[in-house]
């Protein structure tokens, strides 16, 4: 159900108090006005603290700097007079006892009247005692069609005819931005050179990065790593390469559904995070990194609101990769009650979206401790596949050494005995191999010479691998994967 239909349904069902979190006041108010065209006997009244009621000549300025008076105005209107009362920035006053009491009184009296109070604010901020009387309705970011119409409107004055490819690129790059930001960046581009050009796509992407940073929930993560930068993990790489075109229109025409996502479970330092970055680069999709801790906030309802905001933003940017690092730590307490159930509600919203989403958002989640993960997330339908990423075999360690040394010493690669280095570093993870090379470089640099095989082996002898310090955890993971709970990322994983 789209926003207009859902809003219309709530109004016809006499929901008295509707809370819509958005920063797009102007666009939302236009959307409400469009919705009301299909409903009779509903006038729009708009109030803010500075101007009072501003769009009704008979009540111009009423309730100025007086939020309680704004509510009393609604209460005094005849019962049969219909109206939608838009209150801007009203959450600032919800903690006042008189405002709280008046809203609760209105929530009872308006149930039988054709009146609705709509509160607009940038985010959900509802005191606990009022949560039961409010219905929160999300207002989506501009759709592809809305963005296309706005671009066409802006360039109409220039007389420019956009090529289909440029128009599609501009629309795709603008997805996930508010309409005001889209107008601002496109107007700036037109003012600079009188028309829209291919380089303006990067201008929009930079605006998008700024917008995402300001949400403080998602990070627009640069991805330069390639599949070839991953040593080993051949089964996983083959699986990913087969799905490289799965987000294309050709795939939809073929009948393929959008890929849902991937859960990478395994030992720390084995390349799970590197894989997430490589997927985005290889599939040419934006990479969004979610820090789940940022979803949790102190006010009642705000964590759930941030979760919905994250979902809306990711879907607006689709197709994209949503990377959730160490999801096991984020939702370790999802079944507990120590935080009043906030973690459980956020987790419930998230996994429901994972199971039901139709948008082309490919979720890549990584986990080190499978025991901390709620069992619901491992059920079929949440992800396309669960892969176990174990410690690299000797062959894979040689490949990892080759990847790093090709980057560090591309002209002297033949000077390093990859097979010997791999043989002498049993149970080393990819991260530990990389640290070994860094330590070897320090040895060579301190003696004013290049580092050698012997320096690498000396550095390796000083590192105690995680396989020894966390032996029980690793053994549990290997047994879990060996029981058929996950596919093996490597062709030659040695599970005990």
Image (cartoon, rainbow, N blue to C red):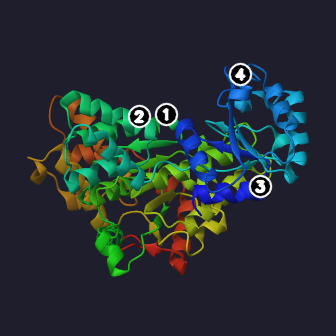
Task: Determine the CA span between mark 3 and mark 1.
Answer: 31 Å
* Spatial separation of the CA atoms under disc 2 and disc 4: 37 Å
Q: Tell me, yes or no, whether the two marked residues, 3 and 1, touch with CB atoms within 8 Å.
A: no
Q: Do the residues labelled 2 and 1 touch (CB within 8 Å)?
A: yes
Determine which residue is flagged by label 1: 214
> Which quadrant of the figure has residue 487?
bottom left
472 or 39: nearer the eye? Answer: 39
- Report, in whole angstroms, how far the alpha carbon at label 4 lies from the one at label 1: 34 Å
Tag 3 secondary structure: loop
Say whether marks 2 and 4 touch (CB < 8 Å).
no
Report the front residue among 388 and 175.
Answer: 175
Pair 4/1: label in front? 4
Looking at the rendered structure, which numbered label has been put on residue 55? none
Q: Distance between the residues labelled 2 and 1?
A: 6 Å
Give the secondary structure at mark 2.
helix
Residue bearing mark 2: 210
Point 21% across, 35% down: residue: 444
> Helix, strand, or loop for circle 1?
helix
**Which residue lies at the image location 38% right of the left edge and 44% below the top edge?**
221
Tell me whether the residue at label 2 lies in contact with that at label 3, contact meaning CB atoms closer than 8 angstroms: no
| Circle 3 residue | 336
Question: Where is residue 347, by image quadrant?
Answer: bottom right
Disc 2 residue crowd, few under 14, some 14–19, many 20+, Cα 10 Å = some
């Amino acid at each position: 159900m789209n926003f207009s239909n859902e809003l219309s349904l709530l109004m016809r069902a006499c929901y008295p108090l509707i809370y819509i979190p958005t920063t797009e006041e102007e666009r939302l108010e236009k959307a409400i006005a469009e919705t009301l065209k299909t409903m009779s006997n509903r006038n729009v009244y708009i109030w803010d603290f500075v101007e009072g009621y501003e769009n009704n000549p008979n009540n111009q300025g009423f309730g100025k700097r007086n939020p309680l008076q704004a509510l009393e105005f609604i209460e005094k209107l005849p019962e049969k007079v219909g109206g939608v009362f838009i209150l801007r920035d009203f959450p600032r006053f919800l903690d006042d006892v008189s405002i709280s009491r008046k809203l609760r009184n209105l929530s009872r009296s308006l149930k039988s009247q054709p009146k609705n109070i709509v509160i607009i604010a940038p985010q959900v901020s509802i005191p606990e005692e009022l949560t039961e009387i409010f219905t929160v309705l999300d207002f989506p970011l501009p759709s592809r069609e809305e963005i296309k119409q706005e671009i066409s409107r802006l360039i109409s004055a220039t007389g420019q005819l956009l090529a289909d490819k440029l128009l599609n690129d501009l629309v795709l790059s603008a997805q996930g931005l508010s309409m005001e930001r889209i107008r601002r960046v496109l107007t700036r581009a037109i003012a600079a050179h009188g028309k829209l050009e291919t380089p303006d796509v990067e201008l929009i992407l930079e605006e998008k990065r700024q917008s995402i940073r300001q949400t403080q929930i998602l990070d627009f993560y640069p991805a330069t790593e390639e599949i070839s930068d991953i040593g080993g993990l051949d089964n996983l790489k083959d699986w990913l390469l087969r799905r490289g075109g799965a987000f294309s229109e050709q795939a939809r025409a073929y009948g393929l559904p959008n890929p849902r996502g991937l859960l990478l479970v395994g030992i720390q330092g084995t390349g799970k995070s590197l894989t997430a970055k490589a997927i985005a680069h290889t599939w040419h999709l934006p990479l969004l990194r979610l820090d789940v801790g940022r979803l949790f906030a102190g006010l009642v309802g705000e964590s759930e609101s941030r979760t919905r905001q994250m979902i809306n933003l990711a879907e607006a940017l689709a197709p994209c990769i949503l990377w959730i690092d160490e999801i096991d730590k984020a939702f370790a307490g999802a079944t507990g009650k120590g935080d009043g159930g906030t973690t459980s509600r956020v987790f419930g919203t998230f996994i429901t979206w994972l199971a039901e989403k139709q948008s082309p958002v490919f979720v890549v989640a990584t986990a080190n401790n499978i025991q901390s993960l709620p069992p619901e997330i491992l059920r079929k339908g949440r992800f396309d596949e669960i892969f176990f990423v174990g410690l690299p075999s000797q062959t894979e360690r040689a490949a990892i050494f080759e990847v790093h040394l090709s980057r560090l010493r591309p002209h002297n690669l033949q000077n390093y005995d990859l097979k010997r280095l791999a043989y002498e570093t049993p149970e080393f993870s990819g991260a530990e191999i990389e640290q070994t090379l860094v330590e070897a470089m320090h040895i060579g640099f301190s003696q004013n010479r290049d580092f050698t095989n012997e320096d690498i082996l000396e550095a390796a002898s000083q590192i105690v691998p995680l396989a020894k310090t966390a032996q029980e955890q690793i053994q549990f993971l290997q047994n879990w994967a060996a029981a058929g709970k996950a596919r093996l990322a490597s062709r030659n994983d040695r599970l005990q």
